[in-house]
Image: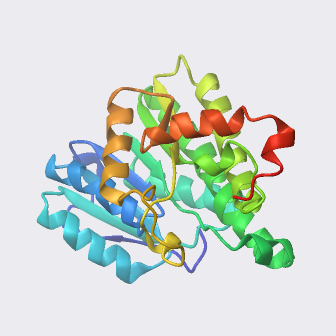
Amino acid sequence: MDSQSKIDKTSDDKNKDKRQGHHVMIFGASSGIALEFARPFAAKKAHFTLVARDEDKLKDISADLYTRGARDVSIVAYSLDSLEGSYEATRAIIKQTDAPDTALIAQGILGDNEELLHSPKKMEQMLQINVMSPVGIMMALEESMVVRGKGTIAVFSSVAGDRGRASNFAYGSSKALITAFTSGMRARLTKSGVNVLTIKPGMVATAMTDHLPRSPLMANPKAVANDIIKAITKHEAVVYTPSFWRFIMFIISHLPEGIFRRLKF
């Protein structure tokens, strides 16, 4: 972990060995979905490690979770934007706060497809945040969680990764890689006691989609978070949320190429 990052304990308990209860570690913890995901665990007296770049937002989220019953909260201000950096930072975080029972990797950016295609710098930034950083985090989580022989690594992919569409294939391709990586890691860890959940949301009303017109297909963060928690509880492999996206994407994925290429969406 570099000198710009830091771990701040917002509880009085400085000793991880004294901790009891479920440990939830969230990367990209400042997102609306991540907050809604954390709240039910707080009500069950879980303890948290929250990782995101905005320290002020992390402090606000920490306060929110304490009011809902969280046992303790550690916040880590860190920019998750490279593979090696995210891997080393995650290892350092785990060393200080202990391995999680449940890990959620929620960071990501959407970007404008046309801008991405004409800006190598923006394309690289999107791929670092959406692909390289989550892969580095997963590598570090696997090492620690397999030793314990239990837990869940839940990772955000997207329905956009199921098939490359003309309007957003840059973003979609980043999520396709996450889908493939989580699928392979899940197979690798089948007998380890650690489950890897691939999360495939459709459009969700969050800060990332504020610039998009509202749509009847757009879900609210709380509903998406509840779907994720249910999938973790059931040890599912993949969750589409809302669930109707599974059927929509089945149809889209099976359209003949000649028809698919003529669709403008």
Q: Nearer the viewer, residue 161 or 68?
A: 161
Is 228 placed above or below 64 here?
A: above
In the picture, residue 139 is in which quadrant?
top right
Residue 47 % position (x, y): 25, 53
- 19 or 252: which is nearer to us? 252
The quarter of the picture where residue 2 lies is bottom right
Front residue of 253 and 199: 253
User: Hey, which residue is sitting farthest top in the picture?
Assistant: 191
Q: x, y (%) of residue 81?
A: 65, 68
Quadrant containing the C terminus is: bottom right
Q: Is residue 125 above or below residue 181?
A: below
- On screen, residue 53 versus residue 46, left or right, reads right
* Res 99 visible: no
Quadrant in which the N terminus appears: bottom right
What residue sits 32% from the left and 53% below the top? Answer: 37
Residue at the location (64% across, 51% down)? 160
Residue shown at the point (79%, 70%) measured from the top left:
123
Q: Is residue 65 left or right of residue 110?
A: left
Residue 144: x and y, percent? 51, 39
Horizontal side of residue 27 vs 178, given as left or right: left
Image coordinates of residue 90 in percent, x first then y, are 54, 56
Task: Classify residue 113 by image quadrant.
Answer: bottom right
Q: Residue at the location (74% across, 35% down)?
A: 255
Please state which of residues 262 and 206 is positioned toward the viewer in this rendering.
262
